[in-house]
Image: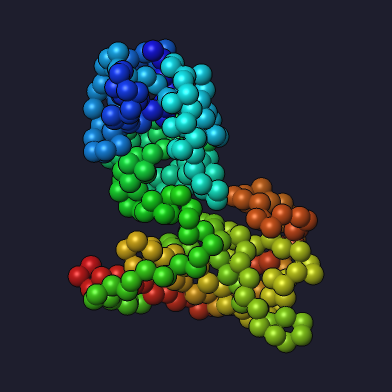
Amino acid sequence: MRAHLGDQLVVESQATGVTRRDGEIVGLHHEDGTPPYDVRWSDTDDVTLVFPGPDAHIRHMEHGQPGTPRGSSRPDTGEAQALSEAAPPPGTPNPGDIGRRVAVERHRHGLSREETARRARISPDYLAYLEEQPADPTMATLFSLAAALDTTVTALRGAGVDLPPGQGHALLHPQLRDLGPEECRRLLSTHGVGRVAVSTSDGRPAVVPVNYEIVEGEIVFRTAPESVPAAAVGTEVAFEVDHVDEAMSRGWSVLVVGPASVVTEPDAVRGLVRRAHTEPWPGGARDMWVSIRPTRLTGRRITPADQ
């Protein structure tokens, strides 16, 4: 018997073939995939060390195709039917996206793989597998990862990606407080996605998201000369960044107001290109750099009243 991380251990009656128990293999003790295994049981969420007996077999999970066999150790008609029934419904998020969201949340909290794995009661190797391969972890593992990363299963699965944040219940006793300039600068950090508010050529207001950087205290972003964000040049604009913790009904926002100008000095442009953390998400030719010099910096945070 050999298994991979993410495979399922299935224990069934040899007489009837009816599954009695199954679980996700979240830890290996031998590089060749032979027993024993750390198994998170689907019925209890407990992780135990298992030495499989004759009534157990491995259900292999194909990378990128959850629920399809990868050379099962005991393929049969009953298992094929079970795998078909276990296949995710149409619209299920790409399993590879789950790993990327796990990695982003882990980095956001400043956690190592080892610490995250310890909190979620999985092996660091399995966490690496989740983050680097198109894996499809069980709901039990997702619940444990969500708890370890202070987020929700919905967020990790991306089910709310098309919904605006803030649909959760408000706090019973919320506290809204103003943020000082230093905390505002810290929250702006060095790069991310923010929204710039401009007046277009026809005099109408517009708000558009842009990938931004912080360079020597100024906000800079790339755009195209004829785009809506380019209308910021030569005017005073507002720029806003925020974060909403949907699960905890709390969050913060930072507002920057100041004049915007185009960066034309060749050395400055080369420096911005060199230090840019990301390419503009919309893609295409976006070689025009716009800089916003903050003249007013304000922010607010919502937290429980006792914090």
Left or right relative to 87: residue 269: right
For residue 180, above or below residue 60: below
Quarter of the image where one finds residue 272: bottom right
Look at the image and tell me in which quarter the N terminus lies: top left
At x 43%, y 26%, the residue is 78
Direction left: furthest residue: 306
Left or right relative to 114: residue 129: right
Residue 115 seen from this side: no
At x 54%, y 44%, the residue is 94
Residue 249 percent coordinates (x, y): 34, 67
Direction front: furthest residue: 16
At x 79%, y 69%, the residue is 226
For residue 28, above or below residue 6: above
Q: How many marks?
A: 0
Residue sitting nearer the eye, 284 or 76: 76
Residue sitting nearer the eye, 167 or 14: 14
Residue 257 percent coordinates (x, y): 55, 78
Look at the image and tell me in which quarter the C terminus lies: bottom left
Residue 224 seen from this side: yes
How is the rendered protein coloured? rainbow
At x 23%, y 27%, the residue is 48
Residue 212 percent coordinates (x, y): 59, 61
